[in-house]
Amino acid sequence: MAHTVLHKAETRGHASHGWLDSYHSFSFSSYYNPERMNFGALRVLNDDTVDAGMGFGKHPHDNMEIISIPLEGDLEHKDSMNNVAVIKNGDIQAMSAGTGIYHSEYNKDREQRVKFLQIWVYPNKKNVEPRYDQITLNLDDRHNKLQQILSPNPDDEGVWIHQNAWFHLGKFDKGISTDYAIKGKGNGVYVFVLSGDVKVNDQLLNTRDGYGIWDTDKFTITAETDAEFLLMEVPMEF
Amino acid sequence: MKKKILAIGRHPEILQTVVRLINNNPEWEGAGANTDDEAVLLFSAQSFKIVLLCGGIEPDSEKRLRATFNALNPDAIIVQHYGGGSGLLSAEIYQALAK
């Protein structure tokens, strides 16, 4: 029988730093809730808004797979591997911090804010060589179907990370429904609604709600309104 | 009394950052070690409540360090630190202290 966990949007942790407004689905930085530590290997899901002309200064990471999904505006990335890139809505960025990396992320625009999801997944291997990747996705490929944006396989669709994880984005018109078959044995899926209302099996979810489902082979997701959502399949044991 | 926390990691700048972040909390006192020898020396001289294993520690080193620390002070809590910065550090320490 499937197990589930529901995280309503308004129960997330919240931090306002002036230039940064962040909602934390799981414990992060000064937000600590022992009941909200992770969903399997998914450890961080931050829903960040960065003011115009502001950003995260140079800071370190190690041993974490870090995925950024811009939702609005452009974010400039610079790192200690000499990568300089701008990620924008429709892109996805993946970084394996491994043995250690420094990076900064800035909203270079003087007028427009940036909204993006910052997602951290525990790696399946420690101390890997740091790496950075970003790709531009075709937005049409998620209209009324699931678009794979991340996998464990370098040759597969989307970016890849050091974990047995698959991410999909969907932008469904009202009434569209699809089944999702879990790919990895022992994996679960964390559903995060970006906009609109969806049902996962019989559970209604609203904008920015999170819902984890595991111990099942598949589930059905239905758009109750026009809706966008992110599915994050991760190992429950890692 | 401040809780003493030993962070061990191979990346000097990240280790320095982790120790600085630990010391930002008035209830915690952090010390850092880049090498196994330095870590064992510090652990032998002070009563650490928590050991944080940061990035770059080879599996053989980790095994030796865990065995040494367990022998010297079985009450010390050894945890893997992930992320290399402020994101998860506090939660990892709070979780360890709750054990």
Image (cartoon, grey):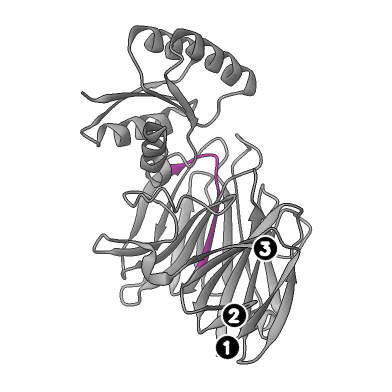
- Residue A179 in the magenta stretch? The answer is no
Q: Main secondary structure of the magenta part?
A: strand
In this view of the protein, can residue A108 be seen by the observer? Answer: no
Residue at x 43%, y 12% (from the top left corner): B73
Q: Magenta part of the protein: which range?
A: A60-69
Query: What is the x, y in percent for residue A57?
Result: 35, 51
User: Residue A224, labelled with which disc?
Assistant: 1
| Chain letter belonging to callout 2 | A
Label 3, label 2: how many angstroms apart (C-alpha)?
15 Å
Residue underneath mark 3: A2
Tell me which corner region of the image, top left, top right, bottom left or bottom right, holds residue A91: bottom right
Of residue A175 and residue B80, the one placed in the foreground of this image is: A175
Q: Quadrant of the N terminus of chain A?
A: bottom right
Say whether mark 2 and mark 3 are on the same chain.
yes
Tell which circle, 3 or 2, labels the residue nearer the N-terminal end: 3
Residue at x 31%, y 69% (from the top left corner): A51
User: Residue A200, labelled with which disc?
Assistant: none
- Residue A62 in the magenta stretch? The answer is yes
User: Residue A199, labelled with which disc?
Assistant: 2
Tell which circle, 2 or 1, labels the residue nearer the N-terminal end: 2
Query: What is the x, y in percent for residue B66?
Result: 54, 17
Q: Secondary structure at mark 1?
A: loop
Q: Amino acid at mark 2?
A: Lys
Residue at x 66%, y 47% (from the top left corner): A162
In the image, is residue A94 above or below residue A87?
Answer: above
Label 2: few (<14), some (14–19) or many (≥20) C-alpha neighbours in 10 Å: some
